[in-house]
């Protein structure tokens, strides 16, 4: 399958999921508001720890070994990852259930959450873990069609379950959790299809030892990532309230939708990046071509958020979440920073440097957590943004510095700097002059025209690749 066809199949799910989300939001927000979404986000951040424990460094292991081992070894590796991960997810669920009364006593925000919501969230986590563990194999095998089919089916079932729960069963907030379980069941089935060629293998002590070593090395970083989310949502609920937390987490949905498009590119180009990382010249031409195009897309997303974000979100949410548009603007900038240094990351993964990568993550997540605890009580949601931006910026800079110790990797992040400056300029004009919709549309037209002019060579290359593959 050609690069562009793979990318199309990896991109199709987020486009479809965006369409479904847009269709469901007005229906769901007639019955639900920021508080209900805040509770859902808070509990999801707790059960997400189970996914972290279960992932056992699978991504590092697959990236480093899967492309270079034989099929029999692949079966052993996949069987070991799957059995280990599912076992940990189930054990985690029982521990949370046993500790739930103590968690409710310790954090008032959890005490009012129904137990049924907890059970549904844990079931969803266990079911979806299998899919999480299979994604790296799907990426390496290039099974873009399967990936698209599963995620499209999942989004349909998730949306249908939420709507049926709200209007058929009339279970209110629990509809969000019921939808999560229904969607995760589809992911579980999809993972079985993806891993079917490897399910005949048996756990290997050799691979289990590697999993354990990677778990010891990478688990602290993964735990800190989820702890950051958990602390972020906890301190926000305490200092600004559940309703403001709901606005904040609602804005993260748009970040997630944009990130799905970015991940489509990442999954398509990752095998090529790993191959380029193992080459002698280390020029990363295909990596640069792909990511420059994605940086332009994210910059355009930022311009859309600045100019028409409020009106779009207001229309989709019956006016309840309109104020979240400012957060979305800064999430687009955050995504640019988050996706910096792709050649450097490729070198880390290709040469099995996962533990070093994780140590940098640990240090920067600790910085982020400290800033969260210090700044949110003083600055509220602004404090959360400052801490998260500081953590990600320091992390990306440290990655690039560390790689220079053993490989000379080119700097390819010029369009990230351009994109951040461009979005901030548009925001300062729109927000500073308090432009109405008509003038914001004019601003969008002008800024987009300038963006296309400055990035004309990137756009031209992307269009030529697309047209070439369409005519083939």
Image (cartoon, grey):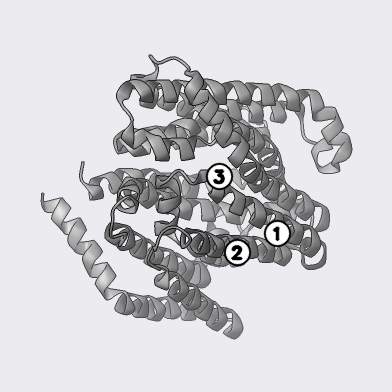
Q: Splitting the image into 4 quarters, where does residue 355 fall?
A: top right
Compare residues 246 and 97 and report the one nearer the observer: 97
Query: Which tag is nearer the camera, tag 1 or tag 3?
Result: 3
**Disc 1 versus disc 3: distance between alpha carbons?**
19 Å
Q: Is residue 341 above or below residue 357?
A: below
Residue beneath label 3, please?
355
Q: Secondary structure at mark 3?
A: helix
* Residue 323 location (% of width, % of height): 64, 64
Compare residues 312 and 235 and report the one nearer the observer: 235
Q: Earlier in the sequence, mark 1 or mark 3?
A: 3
Left or right: 456, with 334 as reference point: left
- Identified at 46% across, 55% down, the residue is 258
Q: Secondary structure at mark 2?
A: helix
Number of residues whose C-alpha sits closer than 10 Å to that of mark 1, classed few (under 14), some (14–19) or many (20 or more): some
Query: Which tag is nearer the camera, tag 2 or tag 3?
Result: 3
Residue beneath label 1, please?
367
Q: Are marks 2 and 3 in contact (CB under 8 Å)?
A: no
Q: Splitting the image into 4 quarters, where does residue 449 fall?
A: bottom left
Left or right: 83, with 228 as reference point: left
Q: Earlier in the sequence, mark 1 or mark 2?
A: 1
**Disc 2 versus disc 3: distance between alpha carbons?**
18 Å
Residue beneath label 2, please?
394
- Identified at 82% across, 67% down, the residue is 378
């Amino acid at each position: 399958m050609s690069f562009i066809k793979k990318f199309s199949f990896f991109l199709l799910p987020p486009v479809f999921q965006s369409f479904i989300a847009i269709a469901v939001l007005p229906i769901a927000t007639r019955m639900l508001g920021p508080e209900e979404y805040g509770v859902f986000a808070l509990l999801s951040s707790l059960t997400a720890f189970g996914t972290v424990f279960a992932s056992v460094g699978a991504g590092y292991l697959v990236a480093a070994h899967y492309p270079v081992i034989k099929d029999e070894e692949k079966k052993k590796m996949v069987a070991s990852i799957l059995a280990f991960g599912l076992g940990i997810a189930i054990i985690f669920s029982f521990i949370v259930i046993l500790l739930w009364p103590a968690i409710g006593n310790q954090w008032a925000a959890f005490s009012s959450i129904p137990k049924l919501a907890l059970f549904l969230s844990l079931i969803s986590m266990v079911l979806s873990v299998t899919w999480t563990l299979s994604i790296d194999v799907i990426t390496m095998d290039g099974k873009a069609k399967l990936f698209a089919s599963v995620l499209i089916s999942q989004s349909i079932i998730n949306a249908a379950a939420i709507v049926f729960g709200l209007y058929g069963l009339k279970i209110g907030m629990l509809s969000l959790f019921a939808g999560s379980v229904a969607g995760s069941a589809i992911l579980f089935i999809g993972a079985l299809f993806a891993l079917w060629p490897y399910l005949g293998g048996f756990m290997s002590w050799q691979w289990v030892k590697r999993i354990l070593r990677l778990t010891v090395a990478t688990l602290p970083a993964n735990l800190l990532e989820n702890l950051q989310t958990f602390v972020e949502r906890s301190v926000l609920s305490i200092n600004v309230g559940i309703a403001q937390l709901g606005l904040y987490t609602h804005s993260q949905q748009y970040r997630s939708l944009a990130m799905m498009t970015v991940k489509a590119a990442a999954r398509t180009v990752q095998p090529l990046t790993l191959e380029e990382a193992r080459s002698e010249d280390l020029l990363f031409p295909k990596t640069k071509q792909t990511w420059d195009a994605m940086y332009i897309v994210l910059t355009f997303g930022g311009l859309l958020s600045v100019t028409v974000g409020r009106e779009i979100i207001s229309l989709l949410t019956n006016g309840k979440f309109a104020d979240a548009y400012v957060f979305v603007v800064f999430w687009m900038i955050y995504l640019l920073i988050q996706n910096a240094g792709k050649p450097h990351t490729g070198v880390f993964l290709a040469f099995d440097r996962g533990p070093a990568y994780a140590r940098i993550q640990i240090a920067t997540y600790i910085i982020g957590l400290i800033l969260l605890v210090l700044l949110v009580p003083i600055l509220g949601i602004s404090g959360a943004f400052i801490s998260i931006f500081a953590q990600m910026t320091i992390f990306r800079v440290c990655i690039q510095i560390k790689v220079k110790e053993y490989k000379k990797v080119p700097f390819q992040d010029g369009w990230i700097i351009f994109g951040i400056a461009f979005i901030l300029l548009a925001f300062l004009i729109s927000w500073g002059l308090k432009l109405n919709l008509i003038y914001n549309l004019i601003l969008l037209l002008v800024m987009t025209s300038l963006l296309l002019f400055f990035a004309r060579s990137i756009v031209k290359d992307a269009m030529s690749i697309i047209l070439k593959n369409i005519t083939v």
